[in-house]
Image (cartoon, helix red, strand yellow):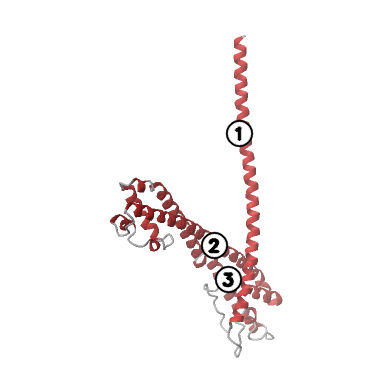
Amino acid sequence: MALRTLKSSTAMLTLMPHPTFTTSQLKADPHGAPYVALFEALRDEGKEVIVHEIEHAQAVAEAQALVVRTDAKLDAFAGRLSKKLLDLAGNDRKSGLYQHYFPKALNETTRPVLGDQLDTMKKWLLSLTKSSHLELTALVPELTALLTEGDTVKAGRDAALHAKREFRDVGERQEWLDRLNAARKEVYGQLSKLPHQHKELPSDFAERFFLVDQRRDGEEEDTVESVQSELELQRQAVLELEARLLEVQAAEAEAQQEADARAAQEAALIEMDKAAVALNKQRAQLRAQLASAR
């Protein structure tokens, strides 16, 4: 058979059994010994890739949480502005003043999450700044701060999404998969030569080292129950990896706290040394003054 190329669109939890299976098979056969270290490394690297993939997903989620919180602030501001405009326009939503800011209904204006809403509110800032109504110009500082915050969190989310795509498409994940596919192809080729050199080996010897689709002709197709069962197994694997990630993060945080505490102590010591030098200087000056006064 021709060894298939593993696709980048495949989930990591589906890809990981491949290097694990091959490593186990290589260890079990003397002919596989030269390649064990290669696939052990790929298996272990794959575990790290999964951890990093979770980190990217968490970074996107955290960035999105900031976006949602900032969007709520912008929505609240829009609601207050709408009320002030209605007060100034005698509760007339069709007035020129109100329509200038809200040509669409309030709920339509605030519907996009930091999308068109942010662009719309940047236009408000120009109008509020030039307004002859003090009630409106008073809103300029708050809106300025909110727009700055909106731009910041939106850029953060975009950066997190870009980093995640880069990681998956051309970064660490894809690089690992490329190495895995290259190793599979190379080792498969080497093992395929052995039946010609060792007649006791079966013709399909090389195939035994690589995981294939376990479904056979006549087997039932996936069912809701079987897919749910597989999904639950994958969820458990993710939970285990997330727990490991939390342990690593906690260890890093503890190390950082220790480093920060040491840096603070060193900084305090430097300040104390400076104070001691200053006190010694003052003491010397006082002694000199006392000596000259005698």
Q: Nearer the viewer, mark 3 or mark 2?
A: 2
* Element carrying mark 2: helix
Foreground of the two, 196 or 157? 157
Tell which residue pokes out farthest to the bottom in this image.
Answer: 218
Give the mark, 3 or 2, whose residue is nearer the N terminus: 3
**Residue type, label 1:** Glu
Q: Which residue is mark 2?
A: 56
User: From this viewpoint, is residue 136 visible?
Assistant: yes
Secondary structure under tag 3 reads: helix
Who is closer to the viewer here, 92 or 63?
92
On the image, the x and y values in percent for residue 107 come to 40, 62
Q: In which quadrant is the C terminus drawn?
A: top right
Image position, residue 101 (x, y; %): 33, 56
Residue name at image x 46 percent, y 60 percent? 158
Q: Circles 3 and 1: CB distance less than 8 Å?
A: no
Which quadrant of the figure has residue 282?
A: top right
Q: Is residue 209 above or below residue 236?
A: below
Label 2 is placed on what type of residue?
Answer: His
Across and down, in percent, residue 260 comes to 62, 45
**Image check: 18 left or right of 165?**
right
Pointer 1 or 2: first along the chain: 2
* Of 41 and 151, the residue lying toward us: 151
* Figure quadrant of residue 252: bottom right
Q: Residue at 62% of width from left, 74% of height from top? A: 232
Q: Find disc 1 in the rendering and name its residue.
A: 271
Q: CA distance from mark 3 to mark 2?
A: 14 Å
Q: Which residue is mark 3?
A: 12
Of callouts 3 and 1, which one flags the residue occurring earlier in the amino acid sequence?
3
87 over 232 or under it: above or below: above
Q: Is residue 190 visible?
A: no
